[in-house]
Amino acid sequence: MMAAREGFFARVDHASEALRWTTSSRAVFSGGNQIELLRGGDMLFPAMHQAIGGALHEIWLASYIFDDDAAGLGMAAALCAAARRGVRVRVVVDGFGSLHALAALRKQFEPAGVGLAVFRPVHGWWSWFVPGQLRRLHQKLCVVDGQIGFVGGINLIDDRHDQRHGWSDAPRLDYAVRLCGPVVQPVEQTARAMWTRAWFGRDWRGEVREIARSSQPVRKARRLLRRLRIVRRRQARGVTPRTLQPMQAAFLVRDNLRQRRSIERSYIDALRSAEQRIDLVSAYFYPGLEFRRALTQAAQRGVRVRLLLQGKVDYRFAALAAQAVYDEMLAQGVRIYEYTPAFLHAKVACVDTRWATVGSSNIDPLSLLVNLEANVAVRDAGFVATLAEALECDFAASAEITASPPLAGWRRWLRRGLVASVARLYLRAAGATGRY
């Protein structure tokens, strides 16, 4: 009897701890996780196929890009096979990122019974005048049976295929993680919320009519609102602080409600505590004032700070924005590298030997203030060492920048002013608030 009671309270305590992240605007770590680093789609997609092939109950998937190339359609076929054997499959994609593949996806998904929701669909140029349309779903999430999760920066598209630039010989540089343990629960909760928001937006009039006709409209409305929220209102109770077991991980989101700057705060907290090294990789890099200070102050106190940014450019203005802060970074001792073997799409970082993050969030205003993003932060020496070893290879294949592009003084300031003005206008149009 005593053992049963202890087991019950242990389960309650474990569940309460797992829900703490929903009430905090900062990282909430759980212990007892298993986390595997995956480099590129060449590693991620086979792992996802294996998990989807073994699914018994349900699959939740969210992605910015779900392409109709061989990699994307192969993943779609795996999801359809799962649905046909009775697994509940729900997929949400961004209406802009996956725009040209939607017809092909619907053709596969509908006969198989896969639920496809489109987050903020784009029907034409007039769609961009809809409030909030600039805020895109940039997360890359997949959860199978509530047991196995995948989070990262990798879209469902071949590593050698770029929607704007076509095919290349070398795969783009990107990372994701495979998760097992308590950290999977908030990943699933987020994927469910994204799907529900997109599905409700698809037919909100029908939902409202159904609620109005219901015998219990208030209860039904509250239930719908709970599904739409990523975070919950009530603070988990009865959680006693204790030493967490390895591997410690926290799931972080950036949304437009309670978790507006959670990912940025997690980064800055880690940078400010750095003692030995910071290795940060970001496809698009235009940090705000507080973030820049955290990097430069770390370099000034003797921390080795290295940035790995795009050398092969996919968006010219994004490269211009990154180069606008080169002078400031280099002058304060921050080392900058540009990755040239292929397109760089990764968003990862290591701090000392104890903290790392992998996810979808770039270090720019779109990711940190506008888009819906998702990262995993890890406090585990083994995982950090694995990621650090992979990044050493990436830095070795890159070119170090020792001076900014040669521009006269007034031209340099003009470039920086232009980038700042465009960023300010975009953030205003997107409805972003707060200082950056």
Image: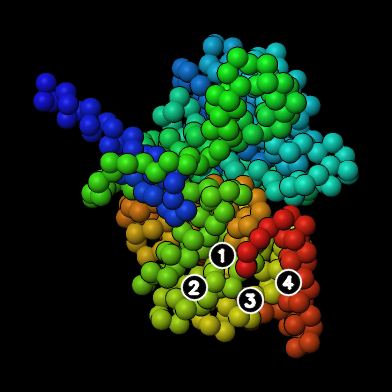
Q: How is the image coloured?
A: rainbow
Q: Earlier in the sequence, mark 4 or mark 3?
A: 3
Label 1 packing within 10 angstroms: few (<14), some (14-19), many (20+): many
What's the residue type where badge 3 is placed? Answer: Tyr
Q: Earlier in the sequence, mark 2 or mark 3?
A: 2
Are the residues tagged 4 and 3 within 8 Å (C-beta)? no
Label 3 packing within 10 angstroms: few (<14), some (14-19), many (20+): some
Write down the residue under mark 2. 294
Residue 326 - label: 3
Secondary structure under tag 2 reads helix
Secondary structure under tag 1 reads strand
Residue found at x 22% / y 31%: 9
Q: Is residue 309 visible?
A: yes
339 left or right, relative to 59:
right
Q: Is residue 179 visible?
A: no
What's the residue type where badge 2 is placed? Answer: Ala
Secondary structure under tag 4 reads helix
Furthest-right residue in view?
A: 125
At which x and y percent is residue 92?
64, 32
Write down the residue under mark 1. 308
Are the residues tagged 3 and 1 within 8 Å (C-beta)? no
Q: Is residue 236 above or below residue 284?
A: above
What's the residue type where badge 1 is placed? Answer: Leu
Residue 328 sits in quarter: bottom right
